Amino acid sequence: MRILVVGSEGTVGKAAISGFSKGHEIIRAGRTSGDVQVDLMDEVSIVAMFQKLGKVDAVVACTGHSYFGPVATMSPTQFFDGLKDKLMGQINLVLLGMNHVNDAGSFTLTSGILSRDPIRQGSNAAATDGAIDGFVIGAAIEMPRGLRINAVSPGLLADAAQKYDGYFPGHDPVTNYRVGMAYAKSVEGAVNGQIICVD
């Protein structure tokens, strides 16, 4: 199976790749690293990436940043920046990549725990995670050619816990292994329209 992983060098991307069975061809993509570079905010860049790669069997998006800050002082521009980066970047990948995925292939997006277990200063992330989940559920019922689409919704990864120290009080970090297994379930399994939560 040819699996394109966008955001492959990040904490979640590395966890995703670690979960796949041996024998797949993993194509790593990122804004400035990987086998191929792509800017998910730029439609031309996405189209050029897919034209360069040819057909793939699965696309995995482990990319995008939400805006973190107090809701009382957040500007509409800051909120929209978070939506564009994490939400629209992943949706752009699906809308522009659909014709480049083989029949019965799959897309796996990445949302997160904050839509169901919010934290202070995380309202933008909560909205973005929820929107990604909603897109997956809605898109799954009309994907053409037997294509599947799911989202992995992980909690705070153990490898990122120190980076976010103090932001996730009471959250029990999840292991890279469990997150990797969630991506394997989406890509190598048969589920469709599912939000695979890793809490």
Image: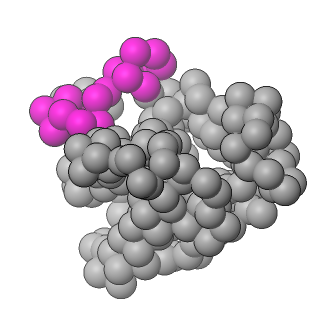
Task: Give the residue drawn at x 71%, y 55%.
Answer: 155
Residue 178 visible: no
Q: Is residue 10 above or below residue 141?
A: above
Viewer-proximal residue among 37 and 128? 128
Residue 17: percent from left, percent from top: 66, 38
Query: Which residue, as the protein is rendered here, is positioned at the far front?
Result: 72
Q: Is residue 154 magenta?
A: no
Question: Residue 196's quadrant in the figure?
Answer: bottom right
Viewer-proximal residue among 178 and 157? 157
Left or right side of 7 for 11: right
Q: Is residue 98 above or below residue 40?
A: below
The magenta span reads: 30-47
Residue 12 visible: yes
Query: Which residue, as the protein is rendered here, is positioned at the far left?
Result: 44
Q: Is residue 35 magenta?
A: yes
Query: Which residue, as the protein is rendered here, is positioned at the far bottom?
Result: 141
Where does the C terminus fall, quadrant-wise?
bottom right
Viewer-proximal residue among 71 and 163? 71
Left or right side of 94 for 9: right
Task: Give the residue drawn at x 31%, y 42%.
Answer: 78
Residue 91: percent from left, percent from top: 31, 55
Left or right side of 5 for 91: left
Residue 107: percent from left, percent from top: 44, 58
Q: Is residue 71 above or below residue 27?
A: below
Question: Residue 53's quadrant in the figure?
Answer: top left
Residue 117: percent from left, percent from top: 67, 67
